[in-house]
Amino acid sequence: MRYRTLGNTGIKVSEIGFGGEWLERHPEDESVELMKYAGKKGINIIDCWMPDPKSRDIIGKAIKDNRDKWYVQGHLGSAWVNNQYVRTREMKDVKPAFEDLLERLQTDYIDIGMIHYVDTPQDWSSLQGSDYMKYIRELKENGTIHHIGMSSHDPGTAALAVSSGSVEMILFSINPAFDMLPSGQDLEELLGDGYRYDDGLSGINSERARLYMLCEERGVGITVMKGFAGGRLFDAIRSPFGTALTPVQCIHYALTRPGVSSILCGYDTKDQVDEALSYEDAPEDVKDYASVLCNAPLHSYRGQCTYCGHCKPCAVNLDIAMINKYYDLASVQPEVPESVKSHYMQLSKKASECTGCKQCENRCPFGVPIADRMKKAAQLFGV
């Protein structure tokens, strides 16, 4: 298992994590064993947005003997009221729900206290100065939560939170299909079988791309939810691309986005855990999502670098994908951020060393003018 640092938190999380919402589907002992199995395989991060007692009890029993080896994203504002899930900011529900989370997880702290499900700028604005936010900050000050995060499905809202400096990480929905959509889409509608994507959509939505770059620049880590679009991407008929992707391809897509530290997959069985973890040893051709997307009968990422690595090998050993990533991060700013320039300068080979042979362009599935981008990157960074 490979591990990545979650933004500026210093936490080292497994790049493949555990999304816990399927745990309640199975008998408790089976789900406890499934979590323990994942832990033995190196998975060390789990998201618990679920307020139901069964899911929380399962996680608590699974981690009680090795609490220090797990990082828990625990949500504040997800409550169990009258035996059903309620998203709330009312303190009469928020505080008891969080205290219940601690009790059922058999712990006295949560690694990342999550501001739960903020999907509109109005939602974000209404939280400022609220008793809800004061409570979260008090929990961090007394060490009950170690870091503050937020879950969102909307790039504009997430960017507001990241820019505010109030959150240290975000849980965000990322997959090739969602990345093509504009802001303001309803999540349940997107995951429904009746949803129809616009055939005219092309390339990564600029607002989503900016969010990932902003997170990378600010050191705000991203953990990924909905990486498989509810399984729709595995079915050519239900997929918006008219062709199917594999779990390994979806995992690779998420992990090649700027700022991403971990993708949290949902598991029903140990075999599904093993299938996700096969990513760690998968050859490049098995991980390759680019060939599928560029040849899909619907939609196109034409002209946009997706950092897929198809351009390798470079005749002079440039890390083209990383140079493109740093160029994209820097070029959207009025001035090149020192943090981005520092990362660029640590590369063993710089863009100025490009010979312009364009062999990489022949391999790029999306027709990116790589040689021209290398020139622009060299000019931008000065080397």
Image: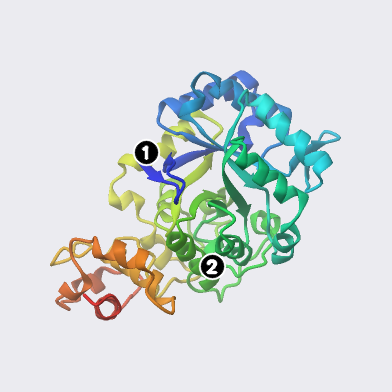
Q: Quadrant of the N terminus?
A: top left
Q: Position of residue 348 (x, y in %)?
A: 18, 61
| Other residues around mark 1 within 10 Å, as few (<14) / some (14–19) / many (≥20) | some
Q: Secondary structure at mark 2?
A: helix
Q: Residue at x 37, y 74 (%)?
A: 336
Residue 32: tell me if it is visible.
yes
Q: Is residue 372 left or right of residue 118?
A: left
The number of callouts visible is 2
Q: Amino acid at mark 1?
A: Ser
| Other residues around mark 2 within 10 Å, as few (<14) / some (14–19) / many (≥20) | many
Q: Quadrant of the C terminus?
A: bottom left
Residue 240: tell me if it is visible.
no
Q: Is residue 82 above or below residue 206?
A: above
- The mark that comes first in sequence, 1 or 2, is 2
Q: Residue furthest front?
A: 141
Q: Position of residue 142 (x, y in %)?
A: 62, 37
Q: Position of residue 266 (x, y in %)?
A: 55, 39
Q: Is residue 263 above or below residue 108?
A: below
Residue at the spot of label 2 = 180
